[in-house]
Image (cartoon, helix red, strand yellow):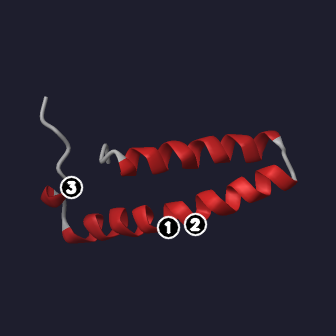
Amino acid sequence: MARYYRYKLPPWARNCIIVIEKVTLPILIFQLIRTLLFPTTLDVFLLGAFTGLFIAFYLEWI
């Protein structure tokens, strides 16, 4: 099975991935603050999803 290689993608797809990668951390911080102030089930779920996405980008899985 071949490893995912982002530079084989078309330029528009690479730009989308780069933008999502840069925006993930501020959204994660905002969601953490929101979850600490007003904890709901949806907020906890979103925090987990953004944390997983951030970790995937950090470990270069995406």
Tell me the residue at 21%/55% (across/down): 6
Separation of residues labelled 2 and 3 (CA atoms): 23 Å
Q: Is residue 52 above or below residue 6?
A: above
Of the residues tagged 3 and 1, which is closer to the observer? 1
Tell me the kind of residue under disc 2: Pro
Would you say 57 lies left or right of 8 here? Answer: right
Picture disc at residue 26: 2
Q: Which residue is mark 1?
A: 23
Tell me the kind of residue under disc 3: Arg
SS at mark 2 in the image: helix
Q: Is residue 3 above or below residue 21?
A: above
Q: Residue 43's spot in the image, x, y percent?
A: 75, 47
Q: Quick check: marks 3 and 1 in contact, CB under 8 Å?
A: no
Q: Quick check: marks 1 and 2 in contact, CB under 8 Å?
A: yes
Q: Residue 49's spot in the image, x, y percent?
A: 58, 43
Tell me the kind of residue under disc 1: Val
Q: Which residue is mark 3?
A: 6
Q: Earlier in the sequence, mark 2 or mark 3?
A: 3
